[in-house]
Amino acid sequence: MLDYAALTALAAVVREGSFERAARALHVTPSAVSQRVRGLEERIGGALVVRGQPCVATELGRRLCQHADRVLLLEQDLRDTLPGLAPDRARDGPPRVRLPIAVNADSLATWFAPALAGFAAEAPVLVDVHVDDQDHTAQWLRQGTVVAAVTGTARAATGCNSQPLGAMRYIAAASPAFMARHFAQGVGAASLARAPSLAFNPKDDLQARWARRLCHRTVELPRHHLPSTQAFVTAAVQGMGWGLQPLSLIERELRDGTLVELVPGAPLDVPLYWQQARAAGAWLEGLTRDVMAAARASLQRR
């Protein structure tokens, strides 16, 4: 059997970034935390934490932390159905468990954040959000780093369920001045190959996907990298480049003319899915209901 007091100490060190902060969170001494982690390392036969500022988990330590998080989620389910297992909430407050989730930045900036915030305001959880491209968040699930993800992948990761959320509609947009400067002769392969585009990061291929569909061939796009959804809008308005913007985020700019479509009537709809680990417990089911409701209200039906 694993020593779950030691596992809890390990998870606290990794979450808090130091043995001292972990000790405060667990209401024990730093020496006690250090002894528990050291004892676990001796039993496992390898280092679990790289001591530093901050402390970070080794690959083996990360896997043990993930196991500890899932055990806590399952224990929370038991407390809800067996009140005798619950601590004295008047004294200790409701126990909180860590809920790691992966989501793409555009969803987080639009429809997903209200659903997550509403859920976390009521549930005894501590949410740990990882942001990545929707075509890569499923990898976080496959690695076991998160227990749920908004992803562009329909096929469920091992041990997970997958449900369609709908599609996020993107509009290729730029400022009127940018259009006059770079696309006065029209939007095509030649002009797209010269005009600076905006990309969230090197993984972001939305602009390339849109250009390929428009031109029926691959176009090499010059790209700025700007890893911020709101900054993406600001950069387009200021004429830094053109980019694919979530329609829900730029409706005002389209109305007032500070942004215009590169090609009217040519949106790109990106299907999204909610994948969740089946073994994560009832708390994740509650989040799933909130996420699905928010998606129905905000995303395009397919």
Image (spheres, rainbow, N blue to C red):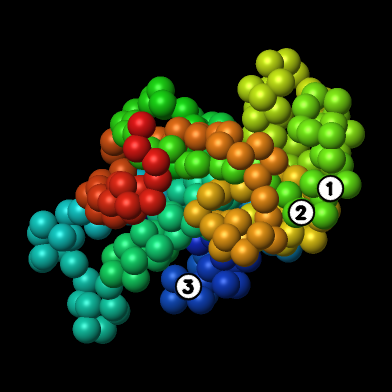
User: In the image, what residue type sits under mark 2?
Assistant: Pro
Pick the front one: 224 or 282: 224
Q: Which residue is mark 1?
A: 180
User: Dot 3: what SS?
Assistant: helix
Q: Looking at the picture, how far across and down is residue 170, in whole percent?
A: 56, 42
Task: Give the distance between the C-alpha atoms of the residues marked 3 and 2, in whole angstroms.
Answer: 53 Å
| Classed neighbour count for the residue bearing mark 1: other residues with Cα under 10 Å, few (<14), some (14–19), many (≥20) | few
Report which quarter residue 14 is drawn in. Answer: bottom right
Q: Which residue is mark 3?
A: 25
Q: Is residue 130 visible?
A: no
Q: Looking at the picture, how far across and down is residue 69, in whole percent?
A: 40, 50
Q: Residue at 75% across / 18% down in the picture?
A: 218
Q: Residue at 79% across / 33% down in the picture?
A: 186
Q: Is residue 32 visible?
A: yes
Q: Which mark is residue 159?
A: none
User: In the image, what residue type sits under mark 3?
Assistant: Ala
User: Dot 1: what SS?
Assistant: helix
User: In the image, what residue type sits under mark 1?
Assistant: Ala
